[in-house]
Image (spheres, rainbow, N blue to C red):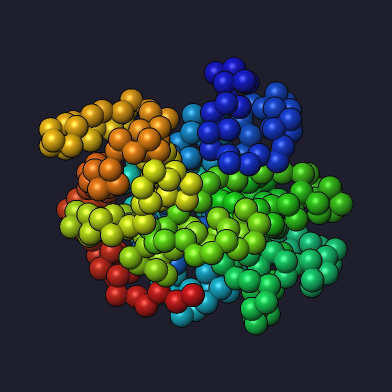
Amino acid sequence: MDIQTKIELLKQVGEEILTEEELKQLLETKNKPIAYDGFEPSGKLHIAQGILRAINVNKMLKAGIHFKMWVADWFGWMNNKMSGDLEKIRKVGLYQIETWKACGMTTDKIEFLWAKDVMSDDEYWKKVVNIARNNTVKRITRCSQIMGRKESENLSAAQIFYPCMQCADIFHLKADITQLGMDQRKVNVLAREIGPKIGFWKPVVISHHMLMGLGQPTSDSGNSVDRAIDLKMSKSKPDSAIFMTDTEEEIRRKIQKAYCPQEQAQENPILEYNKYIIFEKFKTLKIERPEKFGGDIEFENYSELENAYMKGTLHPMDLKNATANQINKLVAPVRKHFETNTKARKLKEEVENYQVTR
């Protein structure tokens, strides 16, 4: 695959790339660049964390990137996930890896690493402290968004130190590329600022789109990134999220009641799921409807679907039914894995009994 083809593939992953020119230089000078994504084990995965993440990671692998997945168990502990129970957090991490295996992520080509394994490494902590020494508390607090927190919240001391550690992760993992969601943008920009000052590099940032939740958006809030964070799918609002082990009935119920304004594409979660997931996994979308409502119709790409919806020739309920069908097809193998694999089933039962804390 030539350089330009790789860039075009990576642009499908990145809603924003900092910067495209630096990415081009990286691909020209390094045969197998390293990218990383980190995740707090914090409960069941929804389709944004499961299917969409698998789509993005697989594209990175196809572009010749060496991908490291950082299981951020200590970060979940610092951020009070699972009521601060570190053993439960680690069980959730194992459960999430099982979910990715079942939903099509090419896990055998990914290097899974655990934060717990570097916590006794002096070199890691030197990086953390050096980043902390070269920043103010105010600058670090501005990164609280990465934890799902606001600057105005009463942060614990651990949560203030968290961004310094996440920034250090990038350099400790030797990551040329950070591939996380737009909500992690602030700490990635911090790494770009501080890296060259403390003897490291300026990582390329490939920030993926954050999938909307199913609920109706509230009034406009903040800039585009803040708005996207407010709208994103969240496991803290279970009816706004489709989980990777939801039953077919749960998927249909959630999608039937979802926000889907007629003839409106902007901030329409059902259209989003088609754009970022369904047309990535299926070649077409078939709408089945009675002849009196126009009969069956098949769309070959997302643009055709959006145009028909905007013109009013496709009713929201017909779109919802077709979307529920396709999402269920993608979730079904994961359900089956957790039903038939003894180890996976036990993990699922344990995790579902945990209390999810924020």
Is residue 3 left or right of 249 when viewed as pictured? Answer: right
* Residue 272 on image: x %, y %: 42, 45
- Residue beneath the point at 59% across and 66% down: 147
Residue at the location (24% across, 32% down)? 286
State the residue at coordinates (84%, 47%).
196
Which of 205 and 158 lies nearest the eye of the viewer?
A: 205
Viewer-proximal residue, 162 or 155? 155
Please state the horizontal and vertical placement of residue 292, each as a whole percent of the image: 13, 35
Name of the residue lying farthest toward the left: 291
Q: Is residue 247 in sight in this rendering?
A: no
For the question of whether residue 39 can be seen, the reply is: yes
The residue at the far top in this view is 2
Residue 68's place in the image compared with 163, above or below, is above
Q: Position of residue 251 (x, y in %)?
A: 25, 55
Q: Nearer the viewer, residue 148 or 104?
A: 148
Q: Quadrant of residue 155?
A: bottom right
Left or right relative to 283: residue 156 = right
Is 97 on the left-hand or right-hand side of 186?
A: left
Q: In this view, does 356 lie to the left or right of 2?
A: left
Say how many tags the image has: 0
Where is residue 108 drawn, in percent x and y? Answer: 41, 40
